[in-house]
Amino acid sequence: MNAPVATWVPQARLSPALILPAVLVALVIVAGLIQPSFLSVRNLQDILTQAAPLCIVVIGQTFVVLVRGLDLSVASVMATVAVIATSFNTTGNDALPQIFALSLLLGLCVGLANGYLVVKRSVSPFLATLAMMTVLQGARFYYTQGAPGGSLPAALRFLGKGKFLGLPANLLLLLAILAVAAFFLARTAPGRKVYIVGGNPRAADLVGIDSGRVTMLCYVASSLLAAVAGLVLVGYVGSVDNWVGRGYELDSIVAAVIGGVALTGGRGSPVNAVLGAVVLILTFNFVVIVGLPVQAQLMIKGVVIIAAATMFRRLATAS
């Protein structure tokens, strides 16, 4: 009796690394078919300029999520930095060093406070960063009496929406930050420690890695990048209120999840997280293009989160 002949049928399967680029291309093509002006160079540059502040925040959020945390204080850091940037009330650049120094100092202090609460006091990341968000809101409203105002230095306006060599200045800054973050996480020993701590903190301690210190530094990175993003955003908007950056705390987490950064820690990359942010921005623009109400963005955001989480969980299980 002859044994049955095994047959092999090749199955087309999209590599996980190509999923986000494929989604981006599909969104751009569909949006271009619906509204041809969407594909103009100027419009695409405008979208990237709009997306740059969120992408910078997402890079910082990625560090925190990789060590099994999250940072809800990033939007409040951005708004507070915006108040700092306009409090000098000048259009000249003389105050620029002080603005950058104070903004980065704020980011450093907030990151250290968040890290201390999470690592040393065992407060959950949600509650620790939520509390910091509230503290910053209160301080901001107390300082501005609810009515912030002032002028921006010209250099900040250039950083937010100016162009250098024909490209948006904030996009070039984003690419520089992304290159440094991606190299640090993928090619350096401290970067690999971030993945080890996120993957298994107890095992990290057993092999001599100070998981608490690594976690604290990730919160510092998140707050520092939020401060930079706040300066970029206020330069893009050109004015300030107490809610500059509102919603970025959730959008940055959503973008990271879309980009395949695991909320359980230890898996993901800032490059894919930034691609996730661009997908999110393009999705929001697509909602406007097809004529749906802006409120539909919230429902679509929820659907995107569920779809992304389900997809990457299946990919992780399959691998």
Image (spheres, rainbow, N blue to C red):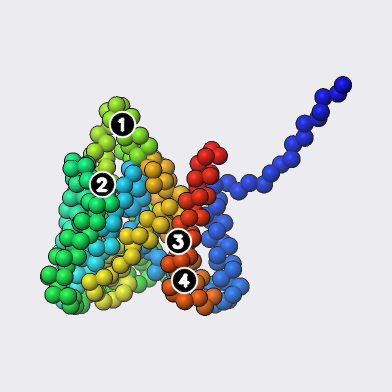
**Residue at the disc numbered 2:** 124
Residue occupying image coordinates x 30% and y 67%? 245
Residue visible at 28% across and 70% down in the picture = 244
Cβ atoms at labels 4 and 2 below 8 Å apart: no
In the visual, does 139 lie left or right of 21?
Answer: left
Amino acid type, callout 3: Gly
* Lower position in the chain sequence, tag 1 or tag 4: 1
Q: Earlier in the sequence, mark 3 or mark 1?
A: 1
Distance of label 3 from label 1 (alpha carbons) = 33 Å
Q: Earlier in the sequence, mark 4 or mark 2?
A: 2
Q: CA distance from mark 1 to mark 2?
A: 17 Å
Residue 49 falls in image quadrant: bottom left
Q: What's under tag 1, amino acid-wise?
A: Arg
Disc 1 marks which residue?
202
Which label sits on residue 296?
4
Q: Mark 1 vs mark 2: which is more N-terminal? A: 2
Quadrant in the picture for residue 231: bottom left
Q: Which mark is residue 302?
A: 3
Task: Give the SS element for disc 2.
Answer: loop
What's the distance in space between the residues labelled 1 and 4, CA to CA?
Answer: 43 Å
For residue 142, above or below residue 204: below
